[in-house]
């Protein structure tokens, strides 16, 4: 796996001369770094301007990276109070049931007293409840030996954390209800273990509820509520909750996830013609509903949307030659999986082989916010979905610079999705019409989308079919039915293997699978989807 400047190795580094300008382009510290390939060593994903001492900024990024990845001793060692820092960081995340914090660095500033301040946005996923988002900042001070360290203080973890006040998580137990599939068959955590997070969300009271409170350390009295989770209690116990799930598909999905070899993984299968969800599977089976509420870089599966944006305006055609070099520099150097290259490739070949550099070379044919506009207008991504349980509905921000625009072309930068979103994207691509995904009957639909032109749908279907017959999704070849697919690989950090993705469609069903640290999409998510499609006949 290629190294990334987000995560520099520990230990003192030779100090560089200071620059006089006091600004630096903000960088997302824990965003995944490459899709379908990896960023080259030694260059960051976003272009940099002059600013505070680069060594200080690098140390701040490294601290945030270690904290987000759970390397708390390493994070603590980057502070002026390592013993206390490790204690507090551990108790904060464990005590509040926070898993995999997402920490995004902002624009560093010099304060004038020799301190560099790096603000950051913290997105803290509280298991089973939702995400707590807040803003804090890291003070960094130069040490006698010329290195920089994070100046330890409680308030850097959260501005209100202090010697007199702390945080407490309180959960409100929901009343379980009977849940059935679309045919009335009862679904339980015993018969379908990976449904546990979903079943909890369907409990009486509209799903799990809770809050993070700021409390007085001495009296334990609540001073204020920082964040509340769960809506109003709108549902009474009026009998079984009938879902759109199909017990056969659900069982097959759970068995298929065994192919993930114990890694965190998630899978969603839904009907193409109406968006009804047939299966939601999560591994591990308890805790976070990553299939529906997770936030991940979708990697090269996002090239379905990028291709749509290009084809919509005739910016490229499948038979056009779009060279696929080994490397391409846009503020930094991008490369393909294992440094592969395809000289003189057509756009069709670029899609089937998931060529990063070819897609990035077409970035000038799209406006700055055009990719996000297409995702929202045609695919419903970023609109407010009402699935029937809490869901994350995607984000495609306008790129902040040329390198981030290049990254967004291949499903990286700040593009965020999950298996539910990518199953829906697949369904829209091959049918032309977005249908809001739904898990229960009667969910309201406030989305507004435009159908894809038939010509674009025909082209997308052909590209995805070719990916199975001659491209990176060959793992699905030989299965019955007219299957189309797209693989994706997303780098997370120097110390974590890539996330693996695959989306596929057959008949009236679209499927998306994510395997965390799966290395490649074809090698990790591919066998899961093959197992699923083998177990359930074409319908």
Image: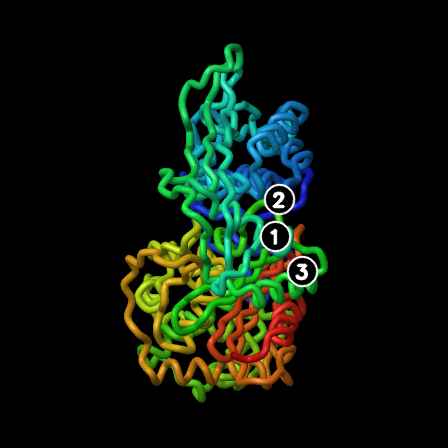
The residue indicated by pointer 3 is: 1
Q: Quadrant of the N terminus?
A: bottom right
| Residue 376 horizontal side relative to residue 495, left or right | left
Vertical order, 328 against 219 (above or below): below
Q: Nearer the viewer, mark 2 or mark 3?
A: 2
State yes or no: discs 2 and 1 in contact (Cβ < 8 Å).
Answer: yes
Q: Earlier in the sequence, mark 2 or mark 1?
A: 2
Question: Quick check: 380 above or below 76?
Answer: below
Which residue appears farthest toward the right when viewing the image? 261
Quickly name the residue at label 1: 493
Q: Residue at x 61, y 26 (%)?
A: 88
- Mark 2 lies on a secondary structure that is loop
Instruction: Count the marks.
Output: 3
Say which residue label 2 marks.
69
Of the numbered discs 1 and 3, the one sitting upstream in the chain is 3
Is 114 or 103 nearer to us in this picture? 103
Q: Residues within 10 Å of mark 3 (few under 14, many from 20)?
A: some
Relative image position of residue 79 (x, y in whole percent): 61, 29
Residue furthest to the top = 218
| Res 433 quadrant in image | bottom left
Q: Element at badge 1?
A: loop
Question: Image height check: is 26 above or below 436?
Answer: above
Residue 275 is marked as: none
Residues at marks 2 and 3, CA–CA distance in whole angstroms: 17 Å
């Amino acid at each position: 796996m290629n190294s990334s400047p987000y995560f520099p190795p520990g230990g003192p580094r030779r100090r560089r001369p200071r620059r006089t300008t006091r600004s630096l382009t903000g960088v997302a510290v824990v965003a995944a770094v490459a899709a379908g390939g990896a960023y080259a060593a030694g260059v960051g994903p976003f272009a940099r301007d002059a600013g505070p001492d680069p060594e200080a900024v690098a140390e701040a990024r490294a601290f945030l990276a270690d904290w987000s990845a759970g390397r708390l001793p390493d994070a603590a060692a980057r502070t002026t109070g390592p013993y206390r820092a490790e204690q507090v960081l551990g108790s904060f995340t464990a005590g509040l049931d926070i898993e995999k914090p997402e920490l995004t660095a902002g624009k560093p500033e010099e304060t004038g007293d020799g301190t560099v301040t790096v603000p950051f946005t913290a997105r803290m996923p509280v298991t089973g409840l939702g995400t707590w988002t807040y803003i804090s900042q890291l003070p960094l001070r130069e040490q006698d030996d010329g290195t920089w360290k994070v100046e330890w203080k409680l308030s850097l973890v959260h501005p209100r954390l202090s010697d007199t006040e702390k945080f407490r998580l309180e959960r409100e137990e929901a009343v379980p209800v009977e849940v059935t599939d679309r045919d009335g068959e009862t679904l339980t955590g015993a018969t379908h273990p990976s449904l546990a997070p979903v079943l909890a969300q369907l409990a009486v009271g509209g799903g799990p509820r809770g809050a993070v409170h700021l409390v007085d350390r001495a009296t334990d009295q609540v001073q204020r509520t920082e964040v509340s989770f769960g809506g109003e209690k709108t549902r009474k116990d009026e009998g079984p909750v009938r879902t759109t799930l199909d017990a056969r598909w659900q069982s097959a999905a759970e068995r298929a996830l065994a192919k993930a070899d114990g890694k965190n993984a998630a899978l969603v299968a839904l009907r193409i013609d109406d968006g009804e969800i047939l299966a939601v599977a999560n591994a591990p089976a308890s805790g976070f509903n990553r299939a529906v509420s997770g936030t991940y870089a979708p990697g090269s599966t996002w090239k379905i949307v990028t291709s749509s944006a290009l084809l919509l305006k005739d910016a490229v055609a499948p038979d056009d030659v779009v060279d696929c070099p080994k490397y391409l520099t846009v503020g930094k150097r991008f490369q393909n999986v294992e440094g592969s290259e395809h000289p003189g490739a057509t756009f069709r070949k670029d899609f089937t082989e998931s060529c990063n550099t070819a897609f990035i070379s077409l970035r000038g044919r799209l406006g700055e916010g055009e990719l996000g506009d297409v995702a929202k207008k045609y695919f419903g991504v970023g609109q407010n979905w009402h699935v029937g349980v809490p869901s994350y509905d995607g984000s495609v921000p306008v790129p902040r610079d040329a390198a981030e625009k290049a990254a967004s072309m291949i499903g990286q930068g700040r593009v965020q999705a999950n298996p539910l979103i990518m199953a829906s994207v697949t369904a829209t691509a091959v049918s032309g019409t977005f249908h809001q995904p739904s898990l229960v009957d009667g969910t309201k639909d406030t989305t507004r989308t435009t159908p894809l032109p038939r010509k674009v749908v025909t082209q997308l279907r052909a590209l995805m079919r070719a990916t199975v017959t001659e491209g990176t999704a060959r793992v699905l070849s030989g299965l019955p039915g007219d299957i189309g697919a797209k693989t994706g690989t997303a780098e997370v950090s120097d110390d974590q293997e890539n996330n693996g993705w695959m989306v596929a469609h057959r008949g009236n069903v679209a499927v998306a699978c994510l395997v965390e640290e799966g290395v490649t999409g074809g090698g990790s998510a591919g066998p899961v989807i093959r197992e699923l499609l083998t177990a359930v006949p074409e319908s």
